[in-house]
Amino acid sequence: MSVIEDFLKDHRIEEVECLVPDMAGIARGKILPANKFVKGMKRHGLRIPESIFVQTVNGAYPDDEDAVISAAVGDVYLVPDAATIRTVPWYEEPTAQVICDAFHFDDQPVAFASRHVLKQVLALYEERGWQPVVAPELEFYLVDVNDDPDYPLQPPVGRSGRRETSRQAYGVDAVNEFDPLFEEVYDFCEAQNIDIDTLTHEAGAAQMEMNFNHGNALEQADQAFLFKRTVREAGLRHKVYATFMAKPMQGEPGSSMHVHQSLLDKKTGRNLFATRTGKDTKLFENYIAGLQRHLPACMPLLAPNVNSYRRLMPHSDAPINIHWGYDNRTVGFRVPQSEPQARRVENRVAGADANPYLAIAGTLACGYIGMTNKLKPTKPVEGSGYRLAHTLPRTLYDALNRFNGNRALKQVLGETFIDAVTLVKNAELEAYQQVISSWEREHLLLNV
């Protein structure tokens, strides 16, 4: 812990934000004076209720949460990860933030804490001498401040004084409409050591994409978690919302979180997905097959909300099935053109609304199952994948049924975690079913 204490002294930190991602990827935790934080981390004093890890996205709790929460246990304690401590650049007072892991008082990790789930999957790779390398790509929309959820969202007014109405994919000037905001995003990311790479305008009105440099899977999940918070904060400072909803606006493309992944031999650093002559290895084919076989059952981790499935529609810049292909953006799994050392597969299924820890954990879990069971993939698809059947789940109900019925995923991710996800998502579905939408009032009120 001396690393953390030294950081606090060197930066003259007055307050510390202890952050934990909940199941939805929302930052939960505590804000403490620096001296109280230091005392707390030495005495198991950084405590939070275990139940926050099964809190729903609408702030409620499942009625039967006791089915997964430890009996008679209220609190768990947090252990700050020294590698994640950073300043919070948008506060006037010197403030630090640190991502924490949660443990029971018998020192066992909380089984359904999303950061632990990813660590658990990575430990399986470690046992085999494999090192996953990932690079997320996060899409998001800028929208006008919206204080009434009954009203549709609309693009904000940029520097030109006009709203964007036409498709501006890869438009440089369209990005520069919001240049002051993105200058601040880059400054904030640099201050937090968030290793972002390329900013581009996507197909939707005021829809952007930020690419991350490839790296360690846990570190990339941490960075994506912090990046979402950073962009939302920068947006508020410029009087716009930044949203990572999978499908925020009718008639516009959805927002994804594409996850590029490759696999290295931990000892030699050699890419295990390609031979030295550039051919696909058997391990690579097994990995693809694992994604094809098991990712549809993993959808509650990649498309976790009712809104998520509005994105997965034909001809909408999103996949509808589990086919794969070389440099093919119409299928679920794209293999970009690359040198052998950079051979990778891009999972195009995950939405921007996914918890990055769980989306990466689910993807790697499917690939791991494929490699350990030596599964065989289908042939790569040439041409449009939209001409083939829609095989991904169409609703969260369907996704949860598949999730619960997959024994292989239970073995890798843990039954307690599967149960916790199911409880939380069923509670959210029950809440959603109580809402009457404007579409129902428009088309059913006087016609049926």
Image (spheres, helix red, strand yellow):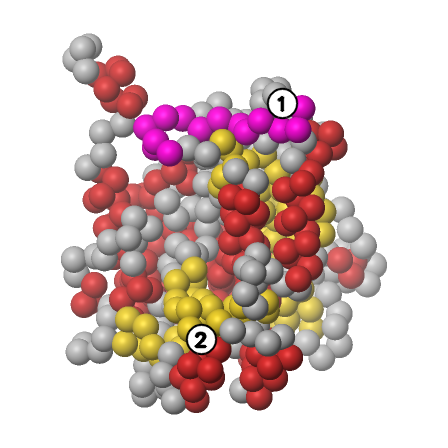
Residue 96: x, y in percent? 54, 70
> Above or below — where is 274 with respect to 50?
above
Q: Nearer the viewer, residue 281 or 61?
A: 61
Instruction: Name the residue furthest right.
Output: 277
Q: Nearer the viewer, residue 91 or 378?
A: 91
- Crowdedness of circle 1 by 10 Å Cα count: few (<14), some, many (20+)? few
Q: What residue is shown at x 44% (from left), y 80% (from top)? A: 37
Q: Quadrant of the C terminus?
A: top left
Residue 308: x, y in percent? 42, 40
> Above or below — where is 109 with respect to 277?
below
Q: Does the magenta-highlighted stretch encompass residue 105?
A: no
Secondary structure type for disc 1: loop
Instruction: Name the residue furthest top.
Output: 447
Residue 161 numbered mark, or none: 1
Magenta: predominant secondary structure element?
loop
Which region shows up in magenta?
147-160
Could you tell me if residue 239 is visible in this image?
yes
Q: Which amino acid type is shown beneath numbered disc 2?
A: Pro
Could you tell me if residue 109 is visible in this image?
no
Residue under numbered circle 2: 33
Q: What residue is shown at x 63% (from left), y 67% (from top)? A: 216
Residue 346: x, y in percent? 62, 49
Q: What residue is shown at x 24% (from left), y 54% (from top)? A: 60
Q: Which amino acid type is shown beneath numbered disc 1?
A: Gly
Q: Is residue 117 left or right of residue 216?
A: left
Q: Is residue 62 left or right of residue 99?
A: left
> Above or below — where is 238 with respect to 289?
above
